[in-house]
Image: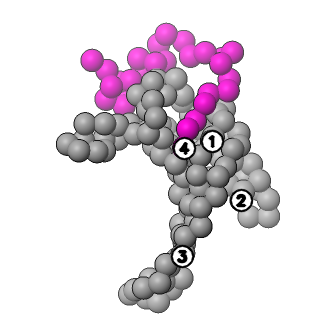
Amino acid sequence: MSQTANTTLCITTATIIGNPELRPYGRDNADNFLRTRIMVPGIGRAGGNGFLDVAVFEDAETLALTIDKGTKVAFNGELRFREWEDKHTGAKRSALSATGTLTPLDTAEAPTSERPAARAARRGAAK
């Protein structure tokens, strides 16, 4: 099975379109990363909107409480495009993944006191 991968640095603005969720990783699942989906203008087919699944490892817990679906963010990170041939069907496959940081841009629209608690409960971070 042959595989190629290209990595590109990316800085762009985007909108959160998937509910952010904390997921465990690392030794004994002691750490969390944030996983969400963002919409990025201009990276889709024919220059339209494109969608990226993003993993954020730095300050994931804090970020999970400050962003929500619809939040405008700045993404600074790495895009990785992989291509390979499916070993069972021989079909060409590809995937685009992203890791980096998300910085909320719409701080003027700070969440109400009820929203962080609701998000924390939904993500299992409530104590």
- Residue type pointed to by label 1: Asn
* Distance CA(mark 4)–CA(mark 2): 20 Å
Cα separation between marks 1 and 2: 18 Å
Instruction: Give 92 or 100, whichever is nearer the viewer.
Output: 100
Element at badge 1?
A: strand
Checking the image for residue 76, the label placed there is: 1
Whether pointer 4 and pointer 1 mark residues with C-beta atoms closer than 8 Å, the reply is: yes
Question: Cα distance, mark 3 to mark 1?
Answer: 23 Å
Image coordinates for residue 118, horizontal then vertical, percent: 42, 21
Q: Amino acid at mark 4?
A: Gly
Of the image marks 3 and 4, the number of the one nearer the N terminus: 3
Residues packed near mark 3 inside 10 Å, few (<14), some (14 to 19) or many (20 plus): few
> On residue 38, which mark appears?
none
Task: Answer whether residue 19 is magenta in the image.
Answer: no
**Magenta extent:** 100-127
Secondary structure beneath dot 4 equals: strand
For image coordinates 63% across by 40% down, the residue present is 75
- Residue that extends furthest to the left in the rendered view of this protein: 28
Q: In the drawing, does residue 123 fall left or right of residue 10?
A: left
Q: CA distance from mark 3 to mark 4?
A: 21 Å
What residue does disc 3 label? Answer: 4
Q: Viewed as shown, does residue 68 lie left or right of 59? A: right
